[in-house]
Amino acid sequence: MPSRSSVAPTRSPLRAAAVAAAAALLASGCGPGGGAEGAAPPGADPVEQEVSFTSGPDTLHGTLALPPDADGPVPGVLIVSGSGPTDRDGNAPARPDADTNLNFARVLAEAGAASLRYDKLGSGETGAGSRDEDAVVGFDDFEAQVAAAYAELAARPEVDPSRLLVLGHSEGALFALRSPEALDGPEPAGLVLAAPPGTRYLDLIDRQLTGQLRRAEAQGGMEQSDAEELLSDARVSTARLRAGEDPPEDLDPALAGLFGEQNAEFLREIDALDPKELASDLPEGMPALVLWGTEDSQVDGAEVDRLVQGLEEGGRPGVERVDIEGADHVFREYDDSPGAVVPDADRPFADEVSPAVEDFLDRTL
């Protein structure tokens, strides 16, 4: 990765740690994993099958989850992961016990729907696929994986291809919004947008990075001058990416991990997508369920408001927003009071998600 010259000020470990935390972006959340007790999982135990399919030169691996009492073809839901190296279950190095996608699969199984979740490139069993570890993977590559996974789901004999949905969590909601245009085969009957970004990607990064650095500064982990320099460098990087230029070569190593050459193409492409515009361009009559936890530290309520405005433009019917009280970015119950449980594995998946999803499936399929 690029680094600053030897005359640059020394970077403290605390500063580096603060930037690394901010760079986790939508994949991060309120607390780490690693709980010892473990909260009871939601929904029902699905009947699971390992599947594999190809996307371009790459073989992707995933899990088809079926309702335990399935009798004949059932509705199917494609689950699309959030940002970073997030695997089929919704876990990443920053949150190894989030289980977001797995919990949604269990909720869907209880509601009588099959689901397909998969390890995208850079995660899980799929790994780097056919590519070098440091290969650049662009937005189109990830979108092609979504399309391939959807085709795999639609082709399964256990699934009714006339009753398909796409469920996108966090960054995955952008791919869900793109799905009616990007997918081959039957159009989705509806979308579930879970913790969806409602503003352009680099604006969201700026808000998150600013919050992380200001907290580090307030807690004594960073000097104000360091925070200002990092924010300035990040905003220069954003401006250059949006102008079609390369990011600066002399970025702080921690920022280079976020804005560097390996991520630049993807950031430029995904930032060009305005979630509100994607929402307003959906086919007329396409229903959508928006789920958002009121304790989500990654996506704020005003951003969700903006997305819902796009969904409702033109009088589009079938749009519902459900705010899950006390839930975080991965829809686990969150309490920030002293002594409260922090590890993901020890905090339950919010009870309110299941009835919201089941009601949407009943109305849509």
Image (tube, helix red, strand yellow):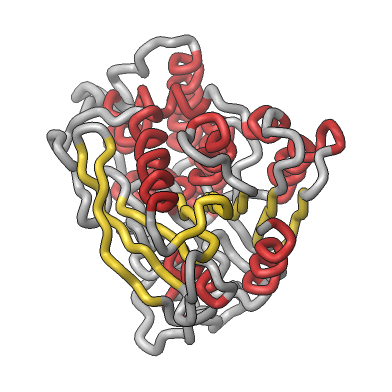
Residue placed furthest toward the bottom: 37
In the image, what residue occupies the spot 47% across and 53% down? 78
Q: Where's the N terminus, which quadrant?
A: top left
Residue 165 appears in view: no
In the image, 142 versus 338, the foreground residue is 142
In the image, 123 versus 239, the foreground residue is 123
Number of residue marks: 0
Residue placed furthest toward the right: 315
Q: Position of residue 198 (x, y in %)?
A: 65, 39
Among the 4 quarters of the image, the one containing residue 151 = top left
Q: Position of residue 348 (x, y in %)?
A: 53, 79
Q: Where's the C terminus, which quadrant?
A: bottom right
Residue 105 appears in view: yes
In the image, 174 versus 342, the foreground residue is 174
Q: Position of residue 208 (x, y in %)?
A: 54, 43
In the image, what residue occupies the spot 29% across and 31% down? 137
Direction from residue 212 to residue 124 in the image, left or right:
left
Residue 177 vertical placement versus 152 (above, below): above
Q: Position of residue 345 (x, y in %)?
A: 42, 77
In the image, what residue occupies the spot 34% across and 17% down? 248
Residue 299 vertical placement versus 29 (above, below): above
Residue 252 vertical placement versus 168 (above, below): above
In the image, what residue occupies the spot 41% across and 85% down? 38
In the image, 7 versus 42, the foreground residue is 42
